[in-house]
Image (cartoon, rainbow, N blue to C red):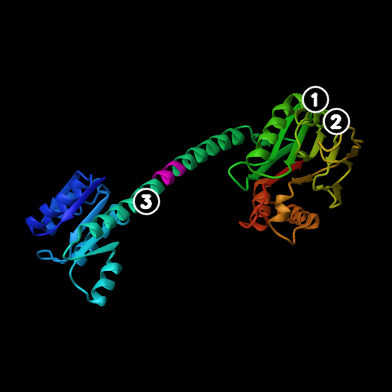
Amino acid sequence: MRLLLVDESWIKLRSLETMLRKAGYHDLLFAQNPSSVCELLKLDEQAQVAARIDLIILDYTLPHMNGIEMCRRIRSHACYREIPIIMMTGMRNESVLQEAFEAGVTDFVRKPVRKVEFLARVRAALRLQENINKHYKAREKLEKMVSEHEYQLALAKKVQMSVLNEPIEQEQIAIQARYVPSEHLSGDMYCWYEIGNGCYGIMLIDVVGHGVSASLVSMSVRALLRGLITRVTDPVHVMQELNRHMLHIFKDNDISIYFTALYVVIDVQARKIEYVNAGHPPGIVRGSKGEMRYLSTGCLPIGLLPDIQVEKEVFSYEGETLIAMFSDGLANGNTVLAPDSIASFMIQRSKAGQSLDCWLNEIMQTHATEEAKDDICLIGIHLR
């Protein structure tokens, strides 16, 4: 432990030194005036640097500046706001003592200094400083762990965002999405692939919960989707395969892990749409004549039961058709949101001749509020 002794009398400093060395304190620094204290503690330097001091013992009577003013000067430096300061004084004035405490003095030693009292207060102050040091070390360790955790989350988010599909803009079909995770990572995930022969498969999943655990599940599922969609294609078989995968991967898990999903296959040559909804908010289709259809046919969420009965719906479309697919986070962000609200946006978009990009932005600005506590995903599809 390093102690700084401040007193204008060299004789008094030598007396304090003798007591401290006999008590086992040998790392001592001395100052006889405020300028020496400022120099030792680097109080005039702008940089946040500090001398390693564990306790300051100063006399109330100092040249050009009393002990209270010196204490304020020390406390003004960020590095010394917590260090214990013991003041030696012969004064009994309560207002002076109160002023000293308000200035940052930790404890007092009455003059003339008595060895037993002096050493007892030194030991108490050093125990306080030791606890302060332990606290700061623990906080530094925690801050380092938090910083590393945040770095890893940011890296994981980069990986997650990197697998999201680029928009599609073809003569007969356009697909875009908006994606807003509630935390660093998201349980929502989407993808779309051109299967071939004018067919496109679009999948939106929403893993129960959000954050790290939900994102791990969604990325596990995402790794399967390209091969599954392009190889199997049929919505019924795709959902059955996903359900089998979930139950196999998490069969020994005590926690129920599942996700909702909406899978749509669009054949732009045959102008046909088929889909399965696995417990997901219904997608919305607006036909060229203004007719509305809700994509609600399907099955239970994926991963709940080993044998699920999957039903798909198939229908045709003509002319300009709009499809909206979204996760329930969009509804949670605004209590008035209902499928009809999204439908009204689709009608307005058609009348105003907005681009798909503007239409999606308008929906997000209206319904994806800052208060939303769940992940948000919105997919827009424009068929021509």
The magenta stretch is: 137-142
User: Marks 2 and 1, how far apart in space?
Assistant: 24 Å
- Secondary structure, mark 3, is helix
Which of the two discs, 2 and 3, labels the residue nearer the N terminus? 3
Residue at the spot of label 2: 240
User: Marks 2 and 3, how far apart in space?
Assistant: 59 Å
Q: Determine whether 88 is above or below 218 in the image.
A: below
User: Marks 1 and 3, how far apart in space?
Assistant: 71 Å
The circle on residue 132 is 3
Q: Please state the horizontal and vertical placement of residue 338, each as a whole percent of the image.
A: 78, 57
Q: Amino acid at mark 1?
A: Asn
Task: Report crowding for label 2: few under 14, some 14 to 19, many 20 or more residues within 10 A (C-alpha).
Answer: some
Q: Is residue 382 visible?
A: yes
Q: Determine whether 209 is above or below 367 in the image.
A: above
State the residue in front, 158 or 31: 31
Residue at the spot of label 1: 197
Whether residues under marks 2 and 3 lie with C-beta atoms below 8 angstroms apart, the answer is no
Left or right, residue 61 beside residue 335: left
Q: Please state the horizontal and vertical placement of residue 83, each as a whole percent of the image.
A: 30, 54
Q: Hey, which residue is sitting farthest front in the picture?
A: 116
Which of the two discs, 2 and 1, labels the residue nearer the N terminus? 1
Q: Please state the horizontal and vertical placement of residue 253, each as a whole percent of the image.
A: 75, 34
State the residue in front, 147 or 63: 63
State the residue in front, 74 or 361: 74
